[in-house]
């Protein structure tokens, strides 16, 4: 458990050290701090969205040690010493991730509010299963709700990204 | 193919490459799936939505909501909350103007905060702001409201009872809107009809289901206030805030960041916007007001629950002679856009089908539930569902194929409806034929095994409302295009609102086409009343046509100036010059950033060079355009709702599989054929159709807002409301008819809302086809289907 200090009202603040998108951040947080708020408020990484705050919509999806989680359901203290990747960490320098490229090509997002979450779920899928079937893609993003697109271009874009990265590897 | 820029000394080659310009050709920038202007922002997470914005010294605020459905407010005690460190201000009705507001001037019936009584569980009593969210939630818990509870009504049937409690003094009998319209002679047509049938069906109260909850941030600078909001119309928000606070519109600046979907749910001025303005005035600090997701359910303003009864008479061949319809709407507590919803419920049936005699009666009741308003396809999806079901029954009774029935009755282009709407392009018949062929209808209808079914539904929508929501003579859309001094970039200004549908992209494409200037060298400046130009915003599927006209005209204005300038320049070209002497602008054209002589495309110059020369001589190069629909058809009371410069039409077919044991429905295939006029960006159009299907399927099978006996929402979250997921989506085929709308720029008309209107009907008809029982109430849950099957069995039905 992370170290903590107690203020004069008896409220504990924990010292956490979290690597986000490759950068290490050391901060004091309350026990009730949620990862989504930590990212958005403390680190100003507002690419991760907050909507339902109860694990239904997936707009807040980030990768925690490479696995997709709803960051609204994760306490910041529990992430101490671990690695988080947000949508801001997908591209390296100017180079977009293949998923981002394909999202653009297919005009997958519309309003785009769900897009960061879907990107992270898709990223997690392709990391563990580079060659998914359409059903596997749908299952992987079933926890990411989107009201605009019917998921059609999203599914196409993710399948296309998988195919393209396979090709790149083979070629 | 991209054309190379003009270069001096490459004339022979250029002439060849430009030769196609004299032929009937494809456009350079429209009719193409160009990349969206907003994609990079949206896939990198750097695009800002309202909740992503922070201002220094910003406070956080929430509304104080009623915990009774109908009650007199006796006392509001905020003293404990005020003592809490970090609480900056608490306001109630006494701190804000007592003016009533709404969206339809005829029914401004909502106070900023309830003055005398609350009218639904969740009604607005006041607002609090504090230094952070945690303090804010603590403060809310400390506020005590004492009520004298009044009896409440939760259904139109209860609201209509003689001794029902009266929710508003101004709506006796709880009737908020009453409509009685008749066109032609229904009674006479009744005598002539070969067959008459009546059906009654129910549509449920639903929710828009956008993922981004509302959020609004306001701050003051002197006498001016700036509001950042998740809203569908910068103009209406500006107009209403100015009206409510008795300010000049020019003193209200509205900025709309990226908007996480709207579907009609971000058209009303929400309590958040008003409270943010009031609280930031009092505190002198920026205030961010936001809804938790459940509050989005309490805010409501979505599709009305509707009870619809249709009586239709037809000839032996199935031609409709008359339709008589009665619709009862559950309006919830206030009006908002509800009068328009009530009129829309009856207005557009006559556009779809060609018949002369029509009676439409409607009653919109107020109840003690969150207010209803507009949701994608405003007022259409439920009546379409009911009528399309009804029409299927008539077809079945007469032994006519459902699609044949629609072909017999489909309206044709260049006709006028009995209620006076002028319909220009209209290809519903062709849409039905293509949908029939694409879906394999003939091989499936009547030939599928029990539990599997296919159904058809028709729909369509207005392309923009013919009138502003309040009375004004302002043009509906205004645009401006500014070219940089050296001609290397242009900016399109318009307050058209991209809520995800892609209007920024489509309008940029149109600007590029009209100017003859590269798409990738244009950016769009939108959604800011200080920086950009008037537009009524995203509702009634109006942006592509209305903002499109304004942008097209602004682009043509730029082009006109460029050609005039080029005419002076080209005749003095050094490299051989122009052979025919002095040029006139009419002899020139401009495409893809190159100005050329139409007869001799080899003689050309870049747009940028010409623009720079213009700038040196005249100063800034600006093009201007605006659009006003003018006087449109329809003279009856309420004709302003439904009249439009253009009407889309659409046919959808759905194939479903119903588990006869459990009643579980799975949609397995869907086909949409849209008569959308000229399509500016096919990829975006298909995106609209996909989203419409997903919403429509959700509304047909799962979605419904459920309340308990106190008027509390029972399923105010995505999981229990049951928004469709990626696993629920069937195979979707989106097809377009190549049509042309004379009232639209380049022949465009709408798709976004029209595509939602046939879905409920077509899926419901497919379910009927699968199980042989009509479940006459949405949503078609497994339980209702199971009960329907059980009853039919007991009755020994088919
Ligand atoms: S905000 Fe975390 S799942 Fe919806
Ligand atoms: S693109 Fe709008 S919610 Fe997915």
Image (cartoon, coloured by chain):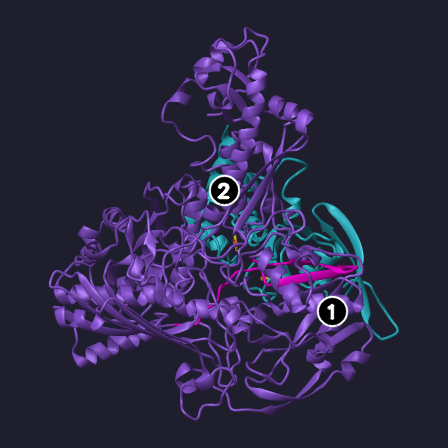
Chain colours: A cyan, B purple
Left or right side of B637 for A34: right
Q: CA distance from mark 2 to mark 1?
A: 38 Å
The chain under label 2 reads: B
Task: Give the percent coordinates (x, y) of residue A13.
Answer: 81, 66
Q: How many marks?
A: 2
Confirm or deny contact between disc 2 and disc 1 (CB under 8 A). no
Q: Nearer the viewer, residue A63 or B215?
A: B215
Q: Position of residue A127 (x, y in %)?
A: 56, 45
Report helix, strand or loop for mark 2.
helix
Q: Quadrant of the C terminus of chain B?
A: bottom left
Image x and y of residue B58, in percent: 77, 61
Q: Per the image, is B216 magenta? A: yes
* Mark 2 residue crowding within 10 angstroms, few (<14) / some (14–19) / many (20+): many
Q: Which of the four quarters of the rendered structure image does ligand 1 lie in?
A: bottom right
A74 within the magenta span: no
| Crowd around label 1: few <14 · some 14–19 · many ≥20 (10 Å) | many
- Compared to residue B581, the image places residue B320 above or below, namely below
**Front residue of B307 and B492:** B492
B56, above or below B205, in the image = above
Q: Chain of mark 1?
A: B
The extreme right residue here reads A8
Look at the image and give the residue range highlighted in magenta.
B204-232
Q: Residue at x 59, y 8 (%)?
A: B574
Q: Earlier in the sequence, mark 2 or mark 1?
A: 1
Mark 1, residue position: B279
Query: Is B306 displayed left or right of B516 in the figure?
Result: left
Label 2 near ligand 2 (CB < 8 Å): no
Q: Is residue B123 above or below residue B736?
A: below
Q: Is residue B530 left or right of residue B508?
A: right
The circle drawn on residue B506 is: 2
**In this rendering, does residue B54 appear at all?**
yes
- On screen, B297 above or below B56? below
């Amino acid at each position: 458990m992370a170290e903590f200090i107690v203020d004069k009202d008896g409220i504990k603040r924990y010292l956490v050290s979290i690597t986000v998108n490759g950068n290490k951040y050391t901060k004091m947080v309350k026990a009730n701090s949620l990862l989504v708020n930590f990212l958005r408020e403390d680190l100003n990484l507002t690419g991760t969205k907050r909507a339902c705050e109860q694990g239904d919509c997936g707009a807040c999806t980030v990768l925690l040690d490479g696995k997709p989680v709803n960051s609204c359901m994760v306490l910041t203290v529990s992430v101490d010493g671990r690695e988080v990747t947000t949508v801001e960490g997908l591209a390296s320098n100017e180079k977009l991730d293949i998923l981002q490229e394909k999202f653009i090509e297919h005009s997958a997002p519309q309003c785009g509010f769900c897009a960061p979450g879907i990107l992270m779920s898709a990223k997690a899928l392709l990391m563990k299963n580079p060659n998914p079937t359409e059903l596997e893609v749908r299952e992987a993003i079933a926890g990411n709700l989107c009201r605009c697109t019917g998921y059609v271009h999203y599914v196409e874009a993710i399948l296309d990204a998988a195919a393209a990265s396979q090709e790149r590897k083979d070629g | 193919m991209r054309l190379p820029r003009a270069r001096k000394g490459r004339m022979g080659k250029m002439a060849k490459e430009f030769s196609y310009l004299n032929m009937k050709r494809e456009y350079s920038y429209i009719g193409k799936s160009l990349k969206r202007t907003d994609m990079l922002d949206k896939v990198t997470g750097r695009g800002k939505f309202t909740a992503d914005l922070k201002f220094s010294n910003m406070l956080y605020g929430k509304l104080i909501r009623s915990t009774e459905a109908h009650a007199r407010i006796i006392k509001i005690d905020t003293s404990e909350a005020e003592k809490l460190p970090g609480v900056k201000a608490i306001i109630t009705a006494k701190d804000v103007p007592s003016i009533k507001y709404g969206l339809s001037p005829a029914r401004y019936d909502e106070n900023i905060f309830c003055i005398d009584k609350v009218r639904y569980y969740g009604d607005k009593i006041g607002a609090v702001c504090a230094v952070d969210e945690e303090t804010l939630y603590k403060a809310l818990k400390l506020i005590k409201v004492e009520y004298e509870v009044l009896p409440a009504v939760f259904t139109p049937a209860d609201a209509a009872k003689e001794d029902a409690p009266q929710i508003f003094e101004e709506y006796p009998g709880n009737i908020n809107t009453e409509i009685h319209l008749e066109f032609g002679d229904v009674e006479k047509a009744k005598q002539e009809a070969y067959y008459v049938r009546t059906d009654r069906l129910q549509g449920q109260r639903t929710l828009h289901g956008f993922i981004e909850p509302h959020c609004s941030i306001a701050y003051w600078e002197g006498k001016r206030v700036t509001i950042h909001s998740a809203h569908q119309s910068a103009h209406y928000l500006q107009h209403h805030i100015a009206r409510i606070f008795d300010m000049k519109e020019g003193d209200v600046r509205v900025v709309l960041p990226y908007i996480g979907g709207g579907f009609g749910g971000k058209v009303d001025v929400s309590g958040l916007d008003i409270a943010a303005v009031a609280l930031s005035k009092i505190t002198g600090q920026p205030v961010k007001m936001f809804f938790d997701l459940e509050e989005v359910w309490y805010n409501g303003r979505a599709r009305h629950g509707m009870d619809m009864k249709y009586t239709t008479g037809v000839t032996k061949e199935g031609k409709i002679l008359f339709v008589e319809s009665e619709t009862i709407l559950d309006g919830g507590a206030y009006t908002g856009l509800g009068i328009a919803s009530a009129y829309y419920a009856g207005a557009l049936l006559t556009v779809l089908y060609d018949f002369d005699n029509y009676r439409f009666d409607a009653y919109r009741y107020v109840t003690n539930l969150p207010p209803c308003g507009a949701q994608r396809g405003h007022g259409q999806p439920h009546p379409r569902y009911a009528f399309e079901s009804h029409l299927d029954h008539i077809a079945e009774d007469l032994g006519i194929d459902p699609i044949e029935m629609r072909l017999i009755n489909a309206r044709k282009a260049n006709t006028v409806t009995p209620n006076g709407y002028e319909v220009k392009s209209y290809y519903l018949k062709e849409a039905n034929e293509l949908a029939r062929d694409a879906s394999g209808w003939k091989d499936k209808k009547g030939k599928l095994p029990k539990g599997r079914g296919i159904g058809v539904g028709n729909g369509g929508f207005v392309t923009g409302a013919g009138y502003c929501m309040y009375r004004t003579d302002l043009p509906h859309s205004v645009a401006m295009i500014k070219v940089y001094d050296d001609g290397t970039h242009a900016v399109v200004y318009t307050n058209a609102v991209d809520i995800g549908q892609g209007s920024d992209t489509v309008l940029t494409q149109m600007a590029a086409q009209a100017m003859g200037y590269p798409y990738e060298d244009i950016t769009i400046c939108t959604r800011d009343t200080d920086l950009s130009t008037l537009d009524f915003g995203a509702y009634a599927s109006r942006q592509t046509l209305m903002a499109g006209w304004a942008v097209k005209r602004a682009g043509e204005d730029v082009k006109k100036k460029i050609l005039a300038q080029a005419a002076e320049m080209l005749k003095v070209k050094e490299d051989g010059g122009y052979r025919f002497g002095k040029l006139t602008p009419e002899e020139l054209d401009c495409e893809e950033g190159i100005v050329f002589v139409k007869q001799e495309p080899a003689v050309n110059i870049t747009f940028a060079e010409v623009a720079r020369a213009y700038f040196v001589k005249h100063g800034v190069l600006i093009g201007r355009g605006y659009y006003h629909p003018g006087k449109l058809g329809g003279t009856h009371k309420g004709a302003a709702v439904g009249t439009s410069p253009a009407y889309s039409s659409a046919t959808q077919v759905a194939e479903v599989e119903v588990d006869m044991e459990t009643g579980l429905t799975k949609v397995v295939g869907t086909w949409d054929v849209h008569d959308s006029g000229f399509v500016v960006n096919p990829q975006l159009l298909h995106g609209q159709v996909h989203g419409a299907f997903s919403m429509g399927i959700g509304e047909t099978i799962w979605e419904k807002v459920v309340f308990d006996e106190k008027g509390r929402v029972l399923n105010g979250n995505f999981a229990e409301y049951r928004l469709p997921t990626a696993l629920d989506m069937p195979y979707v085929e989106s097809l377009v008819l190549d049509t042309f709308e004379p009232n639209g720029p380049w022949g465009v008309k709408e798709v976004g809302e029209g595509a939602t209107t046939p879905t409920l009907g077509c899926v419901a008809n497919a379910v009927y086809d699968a199980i042989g029982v009509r479940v006459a109430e949405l949503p078609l849950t497994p339980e209702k289907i199971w009960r329907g099957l059980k009853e039919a069995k007991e009755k020994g039905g088919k």
